[in-house]
Image: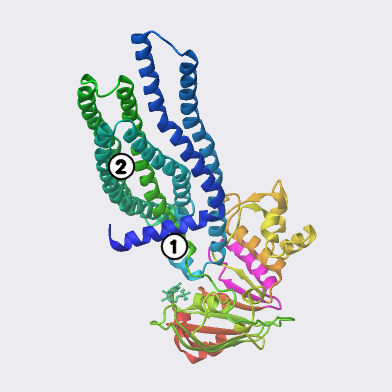
Amino acid sequence: MSKTAKTNRKKMLRRVAAEMGRQKNTVILLVIIISAAKICLSQAPRVAGNITDYLGKMMTEGSADESWFIRQCLLLLFLYFVGYATEFFVTKGMVKISQSFICSLRNQAQKKLNRMHISYLDNHPIGDVLSRLTNDVITLSNGLESTVPSLAGQVVLLISLAVSMLITNWKLAIIYLTLIPFGLFLMKVITTKTSGLFKEQSVIVGDMNSLITDTYSNHTLMKAYSCEEEKLQAFEERNTKFRKAYVKSRFLSGLVLPLSILVNNGTYVCLCILGGVLLLNGKMTTGCFLAFILYGNMVATPMTTISNSLNNIQNALAAASRIYDFLDEEEDPLETKESVKPLADVKGEVSFEHVVFGYTPDHILMKDVSIKAPKGSFSAIVGPSGAGKTTLVNLLLRFYEINNGTIRLDETDTMDLSKADLRKNFGMVLQDTWIFDGTIADNIRYGKPDATPDEIEEAAKKAQCHDFISRLSEGYDTHISEEHIGLSAGEKQLIAIARTILADPKILILDEATSQVDTRTEYRIVKAMEELTKGRTTFMIAHRLFTIRNADQIMYMENGDILEVGNHEALMKKNGRYAAMYNT
Ligand code: ADP
């Protein structure tokens, strides 16, 4: 394992311990209880040995102290009972602690998802994020539950067994005490190797999840382009990589049990030889020999459990590091300035003044963009793919911050506004309509949670979707979702338009919403759009130029800059890039 990996592992261990530290007292209590139980357990062989010696003495000498005998038997029973029964309560306690930690971690991750900077979501596959928030959280949870007190208990058991053995017979104890560290060393070597493999597995699972999500959500597209073979091959590659990493890690961790049994049995053979000699020479009692045989049986358990726990810890730490990497990602800072201005009576005028922007500092996309969209105007943004149309919208909504220049809403610099205040004024209808799991009414109500059923219906009427909603057997209470097949793409778009009409924003961003529907639905969408854009400042990212001939201004973009601005007639007369694009 590299030095950085080791440091990372230590850092992660400290971090998880610190997070668990909030429940420190309970964890300490559990550790004390399990340690006490294990100490009891380690005393059992000595008591069993005493009983055997007593029985031997009784048979040779004939005298019997029945009450001592019964007390010792009860003590033995008590030691075994305490030793094993407490395990149940400790496990229960640990499950509670780790689940409350995991529950808060899930909440943190969910909150983080909402606050995450948009660039993270733009640049990370959804499957990988999902894998961190589900698989890795479960792995961490399993690791925590099965590890902390159990590891502490087993370490205490191992130590107290060693001490008891030394007290009982130091010569025989030496055999164990030299072979146990050897066994532990072997396990350490193995767990170090498996730790890297566990992390690799988590990464591959994330990769596989991304591919599955991608393939599933774009399955029509994939079929249309006959990419099944290619996707299958990509999946098989990842699957094989995972299989190899899994088999290797399982092979190594599978070595642990037989190895520890082998070490233990070797110890056992040495014990029989030396013990037999001592016994035959009268230097050791039968009870003492029996006690050592029992110690021999008991010592294997903590060794195996410790090594399993170490494996689980490695696995859990690998998962924790992926979760914390996600939690440590840069957040979208809510405000860049300490004091933000309140915004009242927005008219809806938008202007860009000498805006400079690049997604990365070394690649400036917009060198100097200045535009003005008066209140209630309709601006169309056109240009080839990758020209910067979406970027313009990203900047307007402050998903990304500009490097230089000013973007104003009415007269106010948007940097002086809180992002929430700013975004409240915008409504969006995009090509990929977003429908969430819920009723149609819930979907329309999204931008105005307190809307009455009448308001919802009115918005739906304006958006030309009231008729088809009324024809559904459950009307506005019909349950719909992204994958709902009962609604066409156009109908979903009309619902999205109704949602925006109800939210009543001052400024609209439309991503040519009519491009994937039939002519009749397109007609309804155009009508709904007319209603929607009435009196609102509108920006439309347009792909089919004939739909924007009536726009107040058309902005032609290329390589991040706006090269031409004007209405359709003016730009056609200019016979520049827009005209060329229009004519083709
Ligand atoms: P359009 O919407 O006109 O197709 P975009 O605004 O999406 O174009 O993209 C403009 C340029 O910025 C492209 O070169 C694109 O690769 C780049 N780009 C877009 N989004 C990001 C991002 N999140 N991070 C880095 N570069 C990006």
| Quadrant where the C terminus is found in the figure | bottom left
Q: Residues within 10 Å of mark 2 (few under 14, many from 20)?
A: some
Query: Ligand 1 sits in which quadrant?
Result: bottom left
What's the distance in space between the residues labelled 2 and 1, CA to CA? 26 Å
397 or 308: nearer the eye?
308
Q: Is residue 292 above or below residue 342?
A: above
Residue 267 seen in the current view: yes
Q: Measured from the top left, where is residue 398 in percent x and y?
A: 56, 77
Total residue callouts: 2
Q: Residue at x 44, y 48 (%)?
A: 139
* Callout 2 touching callout 1 (CB < 8 Å): no
Q: Residues within 10 Å of mark 1 (few under 14, many from 20)?
A: few
Q: Residue at x 42, y 78 (%)?
A: 360
Where does label 2 land, which residue?
253
Of marks 2 and 1, which one's residue comes earlier in the chain?
A: 2
Q: Measured from the top left, where is residue 382 in percent x and y?
A: 50, 79
Circle 1 — which element?
helix
Q: Is residue 357 above or below residue 195?
A: below
On whether residue 110 falls in the magenta region, the answer is no
266 or 399: nearer the eye?
266
- Beta carbon of the mark 2 residue lies under 8 A of ligand 1: no
Query: On residue 181, which mark appears?
Result: none
The answer to which image quadrant residue 416 occupies is bottom right
Q: Is residue 558 above or below residue 214?
A: below
Q: Residue at x 44, y 58 (%)?
A: 14
Q: Measured from the top left, where is residue 164 in percent x and y?
A: 36, 34
Amino acid at dot 2: Ser
Q: Is residue 107 left or right of residue 299?
A: right
* Range drawn in magenta: 507-536
Amino acid at dot 1: Asp
Where does label 1 land, which residue?
325
